[in-house]
Image (cartoon, rainbow, N blue to C red):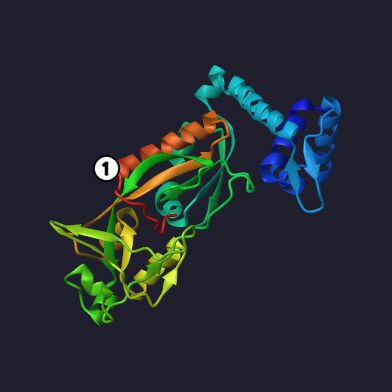
Amino acid sequence: MDRFDAMQAFARVVETGSFTKAAETLHMSRTTVTQLVQQLEARLRVKLLNRTTRKVNVTADGAVYYERVVRLLADMDDAETSLSSALASPRGRLRVDVPSPFASTMLIPALSKFYVRYPDIQLHLGVSDRVIDLIDENVDCVVCGGEVTNQSLVARHVGDLPLGVYASPDYLAEMGTPAHPKELGAPSHRVIGFFGARSRRVFAPTMHRSNERLIVHGNHPLVVDDGNAYLSAGMAGLGALWLPTYMALPHVERGDLIPLFVDWRMDPMPMYIAFQSNRHVSAKLRVFIDWVAALIEQQHPVGSRPSHSAETMLE
């Protein structure tokens, strides 16, 4: 029995609650994971897991052992990454999940510079706007917009993205150009709705100008939950929409979108990188987090934190 493999298998079973899921994330067979845990229990002469046909639960002894195993695995990773060569050139696979608009518009165009600096890191990039389970899907970190409320995750604030209101020329030709944000709530106008994957609520921004402040609840003939679909709907003239300025800028420059209410402001959208609280931050994850923070800072210097939580098309 390889004790390292056995401890790693046991930890993954505890974290995923399943031998099958643990096997998938470790790229092993279920039989191998089962045998490793059984051999570990035989060596320790302690029952670590209670198994039923429906689920796996950790025993009291197993819970104590798990905490020690997690620390030991982290220390072993630290020992490897503390070597000067590892620090100078972090290596290995990094599984990251990012929102689709952020990936296509900001992250992927800059990746060639990341690989110049870190050629030995292999990024496995999941691109979607859905909420993922970092443990079940074996994800090292997730980039997300809006406050992170999951207490099992550590969330590092890596920037704030300014937001604006936009509409296509076709929409404005059909419906007219609104002079005040409150007009978007009238039946004579349409707003494309975006509902957050976590809250399932349609995003309603708070807008400010001098002493004026209002929450805009638009007329929503269409509501979507994907950032790229949201942008496409706006480009198609289906309604006005709220966008991070980095997403809107290329389309504004081409004349495909027109900024509205330029003398009004919205609270910026906070960006976070979240990862498991009980996981060691490896060298490769640390340099990726720092690189994403620098990437956002280059385009939008970090300002004051928003006064309220926002869930938008970059969840």
Residue beneath the point at 40% across and 56% down: 311
Residue 180 point in image, percent of width and height: 18, 69
Residue under numbered circle 1: 304
State left or right for residue 223 relative to residue 85: left
Residue 48 image position (x, y, % from top left): 78, 35
Farthest residue, direction front: 60
Residue 125, compared with residue 229, is above or below; it is above
- Residue lying at 49% horizontally and 37% vertically, measured from the top left: 115
Left or right, 92 with respect to 10, comes to left
In front: 62, or 204?
62
Asked where in the image residue 289 lies, by quadrant, the reply is top left
Whether residue 151 can be seen here? yes
Total number of numbered labels? 1
Q: Position of residue 266 (x, y in %)?
A: 26, 56
Q: Is residue 211 left or right of residue 297?
A: left
**Residue pushed farthest top?**
84
Residue 303 locus on image (x, y percent): 27, 42
Is residue 33 positioned above or below 43 on the image?
A: below
**Residue found at x 46% / y 48%:** 149
Mark 1, secondary structure of its residue: loop
In the image, residue 168 sits, relative to residue 52, either above or below, namely below
Q: Residues within 10 Å of mark 1 (few under 14, many from 20)?
A: few
Q: Amino acid at mark 1?
A: Ser
